[in-house]
Amino acid sequence: MSATRHSARSIGVLAASLAIALLPAAPAAAASSVGVGSHSTTADVTLATEHYPITLSEMKIATGYDYVPAGPVTFDVTNVGAETHEVVFIKTDAAPGALPIDPTNKSRVLETGSAGETGDVDAGKTVSVTLNLAPGRYQLICNQPGHYAAGMYTELTVATFFPITLADPMKMELPATTIPAGPVVVEAQNTGAVMHEAVFIKTTQAANALPLDPNDPTKINESLSVGEVGDIDAGRFSGNEIDLTPGTYVVVCDEPGHYAAGMWAVLIVQ
């Protein structure tokens, strides 16, 4: 699944996943960071976690959501099929269905990038597994012999959920100054009385000295924008998914005159 395909999604497509992912979350690690964790093994998970259902059948893995938040997540996996199945969580940028075949067993695929798995789930059983997931793209696969080749896989994005408040007079309020690289689900709430937006500019320039748009000096030049949540009416909410690579970003409201009035904030992506 390409980054371009994801970053173009609007809040309308994200709504179902947001409804699940905005259930009570694990306690925040610190006020200055979001989604930062060890992301190593299941044994490291000690925080309270959110629960996400997965249903297995022949030959299908169904989730009902596209996103989960980075960090500790518990998956409750129910096999409603007649055969034994499993779920292996593979962090990969490979296209769906394109994981390499295991050269030692051609009925299976390599599990390179595995972040954990359920193990065998017998017919009619439910297994829960808790994983500490880093932001990124995942394929959820059944690697029982022949099942992946038969189409038993689905995609999942693990994202940093990043709520932004746009307020008057000309305030851009971020929940953190540092976040991990990878997919970010931006949730922007306009609590002000006029239209606002949030544009992510990746730059090495001083945050208060971004170049202006030569065609409209009331706005900045957005040539370095990597994504945005645009034109949010007063009192409304909107969102988008943006892939952020390591670097320094200035998050800007680029409605006419708003950047000049100080409506921007610096974000470090590591």
Image (spheres, rainbow, N blue to C red):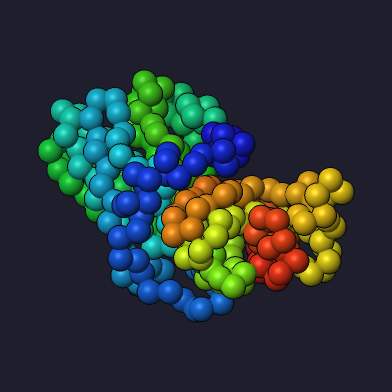
Where in the figure is residue 151, as x and y percent of width and height? 38, 23
Q: Quadrant of residue 108?
A: top left
Is the N terminus in the top left, top right, bottom left or bottom right quadrant?
A: top right
Instruction: Identify the residue at horizontal 53%, vertical 68% (top origin).
Output: 167
Indicate left or right for 253 with 115 as reference: right
Instruction: Identify the residue at horizontal 51%, vertical 65% (top origin).
Output: 192
Q: Quadrant of residue 25?
A: bottom left
Indicate left or right for 118 with 4 as reference: left
Is the C terminus in the top left, top right, bottom left or bottom right quadrant?
A: bottom right
Task: Name the one closer to the observer, 198 or 72.
Answer: 198
The residue at the far top in this view is 150
Where in the figure is residue 47, as x and y percent of width and height? 35, 72
Where in the figure is residue 31, as x and y percent of width and height? 51, 78
Task: Name the one closer to the observer, 122 or 195.
Answer: 195
Task: Name the one closer to the observer, 16 or 166.
Answer: 166
Indicate left or right for 244 with 126 as reference: right
Q: Is 45 situated above or below 104?
A: below
Q: Is 107 situated above or below 131?
A: above
Indicate left or right for 232 with 152 as reference: right
The residue at the far left in this view is 124
Instruction: Identify the residue at horizontal 65%, vertical 59% (top origin).
Output: 253
Where in the figure is residue 64, as x and y percent of width and height? 30, 39
